Amino acid sequence: MSLSSAFKEKSFGDLPGWDEDDHLAAFAAFKRSACHVLTKPNRTGSLGVAFAAFAEAYTEARSVSPANRSEARSFFERHFAPALVAAESGGAGLVTGFYEPEVEASPVRTERFTVPLLSRPADLVDIDDKNRPLGMDPYLAFARATTIGPVEYFDRGAIERGALSGRNLEIAWLADKVDAFFIHVQGAARLKMADGRLCRVTYAAKSGQRFTGPGRILSETGEIPLEKVTMQSIRAWFKAHPERVDEILWQNRSYIFFREAPVDDPELGPIAAAKVPLTPGRSVAVDRLLHTFGTPLHIVAPTLTAFGGKPFRRLMIAQDTGSAITGAARGDLFAGSGDAAGEIAGVVRNVADFYALVPRGLFDRGHA
């Protein structure tokens, strides 16, 4: 596979803010990917950044620990060449933000805690072109096993009306349906249990239908102007219209199932799609069909100041994905865990330039 023409080779001097960034923080995130691939290699994305081309950088990353930012920057400059990633539209790319919510929860249903987070049902099966029945939506990656073969799984509305009741799938119970929905959107959460424990749930599977965000629905129906759609404005609208929560949320047919996971390091986020813990401010979710996990991406978003009060110019590591993250110049920035991180993530929707750090060997061989 040749390197995509979406990459336009640049020099490090072309990257805004490159010299001022904290490359040591980015290296720590990169090293987690380098260590994980000893267990399972990453799949090469269709943009052609071959996983095998990372071998030299990964080997060094596993064996060294730069003493300072300068040494970390030198590491990336030795092993990689930067390339501007062209957006499909021909314009700039786009960044949004995500985080790990932290909410109060109960291990059992109570008068206050009535909204469940569910584990993966036994009749939910993976589906692909090998076992997909004729006529089933090719988008679906999950289905329901039945005696007549796989069929589309219950959607959000059906599940919340009780389609899975009585199966003992409840991991924990929350007090607020909107909190639960945003945990579904983020794909993970820290749960402060009533008995004092701090637990984590993270993505296990989904019902499979397409994601339809409430912000899109509320803007299209004239409830919130598109330019004012943020997580905060959506929450405020739901609080003002509690009688319409189900009406809006059930239009998003996709439903997420979870599994329990430990909180090994409170400073790090959950283990995500690339199977490494997410690093606040350094991990980015990308389109995994296009990008190769572990790829460093220097992202420049001049109008984004939610991270630290300065224009965003940081080296990030591709370590997660999401159904809404599509396109070569599209990223979702991990802001961290808890309410403060949510305040950052909830307002991020900014144009951005993406510079992929491509293993030098790929450019040395030329590309299409």
Image (cartoon, rainbow, N blue to C red):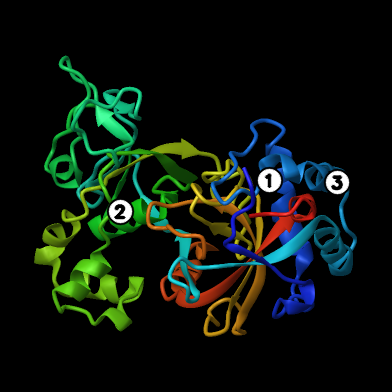
Label 1, label 2: how far apart the Cα atoms are: 30 Å
Q: Residue 60 carries which label?
A: 3
Q: In which quarter of the image is the C terminus?
A: bottom right
- Disc 2, SS: helix
Quarter of the image holding residue 55? top right
- Residue 261, percent from left and from top: 50, 39
What residue sits right under mark 2 in the picture?
180
Callout 1: 10 Å neighbours few (<14), some, many (20+)?
Answer: many
Q: Residue drawn at (27%, 72%), measured in percent from left and top?
A: 234
Relative to residue 74, is residue 33 depicted above or below? above
Q: Quadrant of the N terminus?
A: top right
- Disc 3, SS: helix
Q: Residue drawn at (13%, 74%), measured in percent from left and top?
A: 221
Relative to residue 84, is residue 45 depicted above or below? above
Left or right of 215? Residue 130 is: right
Label 3, label 2: how far apart the Cα atoms are: 42 Å
Left or right of 26? Residue 163 is: left
- Residue 199, percent from left and from top: 48, 44
Which amino acid, mark 1? Ser
What residue sits right under mark 1 in the picture?
33
Label 3, label 1: how far apart the Cα atoms are: 12 Å
- Disc 1, SS: helix
Q: Can residue 168 be seen in this view?
A: no
Which amino acid, mark 2? Ala
Q: Residue drawn at (77%, 72%), measured in percent from left and top?
A: 11
Between residues 113 and 367, which one lies in front from this camera angle? 367
Relative to residue 231, is residue 126 depicted above or below? above
Q: Residue drawn at (89%, 63%), measured in percent from left and top?
A: 71
